[in-house]
Image (spheres, rainbow, N blue to C red):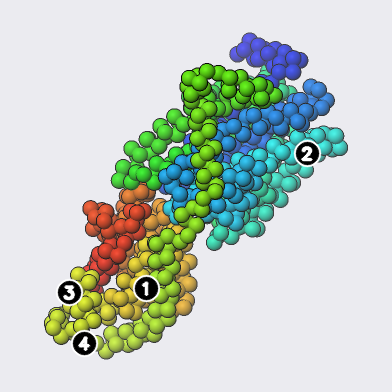
Amino acid sequence: MNQTNTRLTRTLLRNQRAGKRRYISGFDGIRTLAVLGVIIYHLAPSTLQGGYLGVPIFFVVSGYLITYLLIQEWDTKNSIDVLGFYGRRLKRLYPALVTMLLGTTAYITLFQRDLLVNIRSTVMTNLIYGYNWFEINHGQSYFNRFSGESPFTHLWSLSIEGQFYLVWPVVVILLLLFIRKRSRILTILLTVAVLSALGMALMYDPANTNRVYYGTDTRMFAILLGASMAFVWPAHKLNADVSRAHRLTLDAVGIVSLLLLIHMFFTMNGQAASTYRGGMFWFTALSAVLVGTVAHPGSDMNRILTNRAFTYVGKRSYGIYLYQFPVMIFYESRVNIGNHPLLNSLVEVVLIMLVTEASYRWIENPMRHYHYGQLTNDVVRYLRQPRAHRLANTLGVVAALLFGLTAVGFVQQPAAAKPTALQKTITARSAAAKKKNEAAVKKQKALAKAASQKKKNHAKAVAFSKMSAADQKTAKFYFLTADELQSSKQTALTAIGDSVLLDDSGDLQDVFPGAIVNGAVGRQAADVPGVISSMAQRGQLAKNVLINIGTNGYITPAQSDQIIHAIGSNHQIFWVTAHVPTREWQNSVNNRIQKTADKYKNVHVIDWYTTAKAHPTWFVSDHVHPNNTGNQYFTSLIAKTIAKVNG
C-alpha cells in the first residue's frame, strides 16, 4: 500500500511540474449516477421519484471541475486564457446541442407539427443559453408528463451551465486578484450559495414551481458549492500519501454521502414543499462532499466509482442527457407503452444509447478536436471532390436535410398554434360547466331536502312509458334504464378530476342535473386535497364524490390517503380508473385505485380502463380523451355504478 501511495505521489508531482491535469475517472461514476437518475425518473417517475436530482449533481461536478481547471491554470501560468476557455467549451458542447436542436426540429416538422409552437424562440434561446428563463414564462411544469410535453424541456439545465461558463472565468480572475485569500473566497461563495437556496425557499409557489425550478438565481447554489470546494480542495494540490486513519475517514464520508444521495433519489418528491425549502440544498451539499472525496487522491472513492461501464456512460453522459427526452417523447407518441412499460422502457434506453453513440463518434469527438480555422479550406476541398464522393458523404447530406427541414419548421405556422378540436371542446364545456355549477348548488340543497322527506321504500321501477320524452331520449342515449336515470337525477354529485372529466362535464351534467364538476387540464393527485378543501368550505361537496385522477401521473399511497381523508368517511367516493395506454403509469395508477378501494369501505371503483381498453374508436387521436361516443359510454358507466351502489 505504501509503495502504491509513493508511486501515486510521484506521478502527481510529475504532473504538477509538467502542468498536466489529473483525469479523475471517478467523476465518470458520479456522472453515471446522475444520468441514470434522470433517465429512470423520466421513464418511471414512481420508481425513482427523486431521479430529477441528477441535475444538481451535474451542476456540482461542473462547478468543481471548471473552477479546479481554472485555478490550476492560474497556479501554473499566473493567468487564465479566457478566450481559450470559451473556445474549448463551445467545441465540447455546441456541436451536439446544435445537432439535437436541428434533428428534433426537423422530426417534429415532418411528424409532430403540434410541437412546433414557440419553436423559433425555443431554438434561439437554447443557442444563446437563455432557455431556462424562456421556460419560466412559456414552458409547462417539469413534473407535468402528459399535457403536450416538449422534447426541449430538459435543456433548461444546459442553459444554466452555459451562463456559468460565460461569466465564471472572469469571476475567478477577479476573486484571485482582489480577494486572494482562498478561505475568504470560500466564505463569499458559500454566502452567495446560501442566499440562492433561501431565494428558492422564499419564492417557492406550490401552484407554479417554474420560477424556482428553472431560475438561474435559485439554482446557482449547486454550481457554487462545487466551485467553492475547488478553491479549498483543488485536486492537484491534495496529497495522495495520507495516513490509514485519514484514508478510512475519507472513504467512510464518501460512502455515507453516496448512500444518502441514493436514498434521497428514492424519497425526495419534486413537488413537495420540503424539497424547495432546504431539501434540494442539503442534497446538493452531500453531492459536494461526494465530489470532494472522489477528487482526493488519498481516498479509495475514485477507485470505487471507476469501472469500464461507468467510464463508458460517464463520458457519454452529456449526449445521453441531451437526446433522452426527444427519443422518449417521439417513441411514446407512436407506441402505447402503458400495457408493457418495462419492455418499452428497455427499448427507449437502447434507442437513446444508439443515438448517443452515433453523436459521440461522429459529432462530439470529431468536433472537439477540429480546428475551425481551416473550415473554409475544408469546404472548398469537399466541393471539389468527384460527385460520387460528395453524394457518399452522408453527414453532409444529412446536415443539409436537417437545416432545410428546420427552416421549413421556422417559416410555417404550427398546427398547435390554433386550438385543436379537443381544446375547443374542453374550453366550451368548461364554460358551460361553470354556469351549471351555480345552479347545481341550489339544486343540491333542494335534493337534500327532498331526500329527507322521501319514503325509504320508494318504487324501484318506473315504467318507461311514464317518463317524459326528454328523459326517454336521455336514457336511450346513455344506455340507462328508467331506474338508473331516475336515481341519477336525484343524486347529488360533486365531480373532481382532470381534462378527461372536464371534457365529459356536459354529458355528466345531463345525467346528473345537480352535479358540480371541477376539472382542470394537467391536474395531478397532489393537487386534489387542496381542491377538495376549497370546495368543502364553499359548501360544494355533495354526499357522492366522483374522482377522476390518474391521467397525468402516478398516485402515491400517501396521496390517495390524503384525498380520501380530505373528503371524509361520511361521503360515498367513486374513483374512475385511468385509460392512459400511452404512459407507463397507467397500470400503477389503476392498482393504487383498487388498493385504496380495498382499504376504505366508502370508496368504490368505476373501472373505465377495463370497459374501454378494447374500444380504441371511443377515443380521439391521443388515445386518452374520449370522443363523443366514448363520452356516452364513460357517462353511462359512471351513472350505472353510482346507481347500483346507492340502490
Q: What's the residue type where badge 3 is placed?
A: Thr
Residue 288 percent location from the top left of the image? 63, 37
Residue located 42% across and 60% down the image? 420
Q: Provide the secondary structure element on which disc 4 rests.
A: loop
Between discs 3 and 1, the one toward the N terminus: 3
State the residue in front, 111 or 205. Answer: 111
Between discs 2 and 3, the one toward the N terminus: 2
Q: Which mark is residue 171?
A: 2
Q: Residue 446 carries which label?
A: none
Q: Nearer the viewer, mark 1 or mark 4?
A: 1
Which residue is label 4 attached to?
455
Residue 350 percent location from the top left of the image? 40, 32
| Mark 3 surroundings: few (<14), some (14-19) or many (≥20) residues within 10 A | some
Proximity of marks 3 and 1: CB atoms separated by less than 8 Å: no
| Mark 2 surroundings: few (<14), some (14-19) or many (≥20) residues within 10 A | few
Residue 462 percent location from the top left of the image? 15, 82
Q: Examine the rendering and report whether any part of residue 528 can be seen.
A: no
Which residue is label 1 attached to?
494
Q: In the rendered view, does 609 fall on the left or right side of 27?
A: left
Proximity of marks 4 and 3: CB atoms separated by less than 8 Å: no
Residue 463 percent location from the top left of the image? 13, 82
Q: In which quarter of the image is residue 635?
A: bottom left
| Mark 4 surroundings: few (<14), some (14-19) or many (≥20) residues within 10 A | few
| Mark 1 surroundings: few (<14), some (14-19) or many (≥20) residues within 10 A | many
